[in-house]
Amino acid sequence: MAIIVQKFGGTSVADAEKIQRAARRAKKRADQGYQVVMVTSARGKMTDHLIADALELNPDPCRREMDQLLSTGEQQTVALMAMALHSMGQPAISMTGFQAGIRTDAVPAKARITNIEREKIQAQLDDGKIVVVAGFQGIDEYENITTLGRGGSDTSAVALAAALEAEQCEIYTDVDGVYTTDPRKFKRALKIDQISYDEMLEMASLGAGVMHGRAIEFGKKYGVTIHVRSSSKEIEGTLITHEVPKMEGILVSGATIQKDLAKITIIEIENHPGIAARIFANLAKARVSVNDIIQTEISEDIANLSFTVGKSDLADAMKCIKKIKSDVNYKDMFVREDIAEVSIVGIGMRTHYGVADKMFNALAQKQVNIDSITTSEIRISCIIDKDQGDMALETLCTVFELDKEPEDREM
Amino acid sequence: MAIIVQKFGGTSVADAEKIQRAARRAKKRADQGYQVVMVTSARGKMTDHLIADALELNPDPCRREMDQLLSTGEQQTVALMAMALHSMGQPAISMTGFQAGIRTDAVPAKARITNIEREKIQAQLDDGKIVVVAGFQGIDEYENITTLGRGGSDTSAVALAAALEAEQCEIYTDVDGVYTTDPRKFKRALKIDQISYDEMLEMASLGAGVMHGRAIEFGKKYGVTIHVRSSSKEIEGTLITHEVPKMEGILVSGATIQKDLAKITIIEIENHPGIAARIFANLAKARVSVNDIIQTEISEDIANLSFTVGKSDLADAMKCIKKIKSDVNYKDMFVREDIAEVSIVGIGMRTHYGVADKMFNALAQKQVNIDSITTSEIRISCIIDKDQGDMALETLCTVFELDKEPEDREM
C-alpha cells in the first residue's frame, strides 16, 4: 500500500478546530486507501511559552534540558491529534520521536537524524492506523531526547517519507505553495507547479521561507517528492522534485529579495593564503552566519574583502572584525546597512546564455545602481540600494515573465 | 554514599519561585553529602488544562493517548527543575519515566511499576548530579508511556527510594506532616512524629489525604522510611515506618471523619453463598468503589446487606442495584445520605482491650446515635448522623487525648 506523509506546522494545529481540520485531511487520505503518517509541530505559541518559562529560571539553560522541555510541545500535539482522529472513528496512534525510532546524533538543539527504525511505524500502519509522529525531535544513543533545530518538523517529515519510501511528503502550510516571488511584493506572482530541489534550496537560502533548507537537502538526497500545499484550501500546491526535462526550458523559476542584510567591507587586507580563512573562522566562532563573500584584488598583495550578514548578526560581526584587526592587518572597515539583495533562480541558467546580461540591462534601464554581484550555477544575486529594492524586484519579475505560466513565456 | 529521594507535588512546583525553593531544598541535601533524587509532579493546574484540551477534541479519549498527553506535564517540570539547579551551580539532569528505566505493566492510566533499572539513575548520581525524575509515569514493554493514576508521583518516589535503597523518601507537601486528626476540624490536633505503615494506610483510606495508599503499601513492602514534611517550612514532619515497640503503647494514633459517604441497605436478601459476591462483582463492573460492608442475618435464609460508597458513586451504585433486583431477589433498597463516619486508628488496639468500649461510651454520653459499626484489627469506625459528626470527632479526640503527645497521655 502506498504511504503518504503529511506534515502540519504549528499554525496548522494551533487550536482544536485546526487540529480537527488536519485530522480530516489525514482521514481523507486514509479513506482513499493510503497508509498515512502525520508529522506535527507544537501548537501555536507553545514553544515560545516554554522558552519563556525556562528563561525565568535560567538565563542560559543547557541545551539538553531545553530539548527535554521543548519536545513536550510536539508530544502534546500528537496525542491530541490521535484523540481527534479517534473521535472521527479513525484508528490512530501517536508516537514521540523515540517511540517512532527516530535516532539522531548527540548534538542537542540541532541534532541530525542518523537512522529511523521504520518497522515501528510500519507495524502500526499495517494494523490500519494513522500514525501521528512528533516532529522536530528524536533520541540519541544515550536516550537523551534531542531536537532538530529550526525547520525540524519539515526535516522529520521528509526523513520519515524517505525511510518509509512514501509516495509523497505533503507539507501543509499557511500559503498555497511556492510562488515565483513573494506575492505581497509582486501581486502578479504565480504559484509554481513544480520546482527542483536545487532551485528550492536557493530560494530557501534567500529567505523564501516556505521550507527549511535542511529538509529540502534531505528530500534531494533520498529523492522524496515534497508537496508544499495549503492547510486551509483543498488545492494542489507546489511539487519539489528532481529535475525533469521540462524544467530545463525555464530560464528563471523565481525571484527573491532580502532586506535584512548588512554588508561589511574590509579595506586593503593582505592577499595571502589563509587570511580570509582566518577571518571567517573567527566569524564562525562568534556564531555569525555569513551569506555572500566578494573579494577584489587591488594589487598582487592587497585586496578588499566584502561579505553580507543578517542585520541581527551585524554587531557581533563588527566586534569580531575589530578584534582581529592587529592579527589580519587591514586598513579600514566599512559597513553598509542600506542595501537589499535581489536574486533570480533557475536551473535553465546552466544551459542558457544571456540571463545575467538581461538582468543587468533591466536594472540599468531603471537606473538601479548595482553595488556587487554574486552568482551560483543557478542563481544571480545583486546587492543594490535598499530604497530601489521593491522596484528592482518588480522589474525582474516583469522582464523574466514571472507572472506567466512557463509555457506562455516568450523566452 | 547515602541516597535521599525527595518528592515535590504539583503545588510545590507551581511557579518559578516554588521550583527554585524546591531546588534549594535538594541542593542543601546535596551539600550535606547526600546523593539526591528529586521526583516531581506536573506544575499546578497543568494536568487539568491538558485534560480540558483533550475533552475538547474527544469526550472519551483513549487512555493510552491521555497518558501520552499528561506525561508531558511532569516532563516539563523536571527539565525546568534541572535548569533551576544549574542556575545555582548544582550539576543536575532530568529524566522522564522511560529515561529513568521505570518499567510498568501495560495498563494505561493506572499502571503499576514492575521494575526500575536502578543503574541509569545511579550512574548519574555517581557522576555528582542531582537526578530529577518525572513522577507519575513509566513505560511499558511496548514502549508506551504509562501513568500510575492518583497519587502516582508518591508511588514513583517510594518505588525509586526502594530501588535505590535510599535512606529516606521525603514527601514534600503543603501540610507539616500527618496530624492526629484534621486540624481544621479539631484545633488542638497534634502532628504525629512517627506512625506505622498500617496505621497510615487506614488513615489514608479514611480520607486523611496526605499520601495515597498505594505509595504507603509500596513503602511497607520494601521498608522505605517515608518522611511527610512541609515544602515551605524547615521543620521535621512525620515519619512513616515499620512498627517500633513504642508504638504499641499508643492506643489511638489518630481519628478521622468522612462526610461524603452514602449508605445503601438492601433489605431481605437471600442469604445464600455467592449472592453477596454477585452484588459486589456487579458494583465493581459499574466502577463503584465500595467502602465498608455490613451484613445482618434476619433468619437462616434472609439477611440485610449494607455498604457505604462515596457520594459521587451513589447514582451509579443505585442504578446497579436496581438492575440486578430480579437477579438477586431482594425486597427493598434504602439509602441514607445524611451520614458521617468517624473512625479511630491505632496499632495499640491489637493488644489492648477496652478501646471500642471507651469509644461507644464517649459517643453515648454525647447522645450520638450509632447507625452501624465496622472494625479492622487497628481501626474502629462508626456511622452516625451527619449533623453530629464534628461534635463526635471532637469528643473522640478529647477522650483519646489526641491533643497530647503520646508520652503525656494518661492511658
Image (spheres, coloured by chain):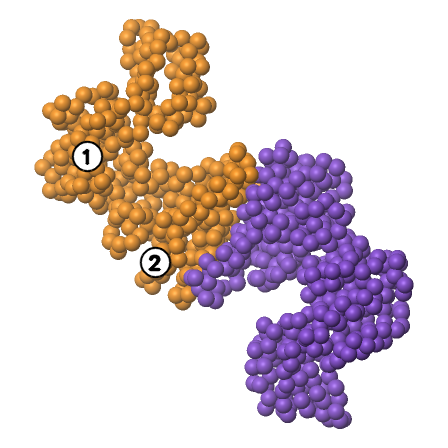
Chain colours: A orange, B purple
Q: Is residue A321 above or below residue A174?
A: above
**Residue ID for mark 2:** A21
Q: How would you rate the neighbour count of disc 1 (Cα within 10 Å): few for under 14, some for 14-19, many for 20 or more?
A: many
Q: Is residue A234 left or right of residue B160?
A: left
Q: Is residue A13 above or below residue A127?
A: above
Residue displayed at 48% across by 60% down: B52
Kindly state the secondary structure of the residue where label 1 is placed: loop
Instruction: Count the numbered circles shown.
Output: 2
Q: Is residue B170 above or below residue A257?
A: below
The label shown at residue A252 is 1
Kindly state the secondary structure of the residue where label 2 is placed: helix
Residue displayed at 56% across by 43% down: B16
Amino acid type of disc 1?
A: Val
Q: Nearer the viewer, residue B125 or A139?
A: B125
Q: Nearer the viewer, residue A296 or B180?
A: B180
Q: Earlier in the sequence, mark 1 or mark 2?
A: 2
